Amino acid sequence: MEFELEFFGVLVRGDDDVYKPSEDSLLLLDWIISYSNPSLDIDLDIGAGSGLIGIGNAKFFNRYTLLVDISYKSLQYCWRNAGLNEVDPYIDTILYGDGVDFLREGLEPYVMCNPPYLPVYGEVSWWSGGTTGLDLIIRLLDELVGRNRFKLLFVYSSYTDLVKLRELVDYSEGLWFDWIDYIEFGMERIYLGFVCKG
């Protein structure tokens, strides 16, 4: 069944095969619209789903934004949603994948990500964050750490392995991690965090 949602003036559509934006997406988008000023070379929405985050970034800041997802169906909706919001000139390329290793060396990326963050044991699915809830974040940090500068803005949960998350950030390498905001969702806290370098 197809959905249509509008948040902060950003209209998105999708279906059952596309992540439907919810509270975690709104936490990320609200911060991007209210406080974001990355001043880096290129903006990316990794795990774009319906494209809400990247399209919002392009719409409010007229910034070139790459939308990246592992679902071809999601990418089709991202492209349509970019057109609905009249930001297709800023969404020049949509890529199939879930990382940043395709970026040219020397680029300093601003990565926005609402990854699968729930720890899951045994079951592997598109919403699984692995046993720590950090599978995608671990891969992104591994791909980003060699760059001179970057900012990774992402959502995680109180169920995510926070000890592992802090272990990932090597302050001696010039990395910095902190949380920015959170919302309560039942017994869970959903956090907005960042890791940056430079």
Image (cartoon, rainbow, N blue to C red):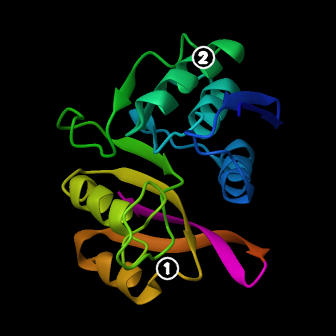
Q: Determine which residue is flagged by label 2.
A: 80
**Residue 99, above or below 8:** below
**Residue 170, above or below 104:** below
| Residue 160 located left or right of residue 180 | left
Q: Quadrant of residue 70?
A: top left
Q: Determine which residue is flagged by label 1.
A: 160
Q: Which amino acid is tagged 1?
A: Thr
**Crowding at mark 2 (Cα within 10 Å: few <14, some 14-19, many 20+):** some
Residue 20 rendering spot, x and y as whole percentages: 66, 45
Per the model, the C-alpha gap separating discs 1 and 2 is 33 Å
> For numbered disc 1, what is the local secondary structure?
loop
Q: Residue at x 64, y 34 (%)?
A: 15
Magenta highlight range: 186-198
| Residue 94 located left or right of residue 146 | right
Q: Residue at x 72, y 42 (%)?
A: 33
**Residue 14, above or below 22:** above
- Is residue 65 visible from the viewing direction of this image? no
Residue 160 rendering spot, x and y as whole percentages: 49, 79
Instruction: Pick whichever of labels 1 and 2 is earlier in the sequence.
Output: 2
- Is residue 5 visible from the viewing direction of this image? yes
Q: Quadrant of residue 60?
A: top right
Q: Residue at x 57, y 24 (%)?
A: 77
> For numbered disc 2, what is the local secondary structure?
helix
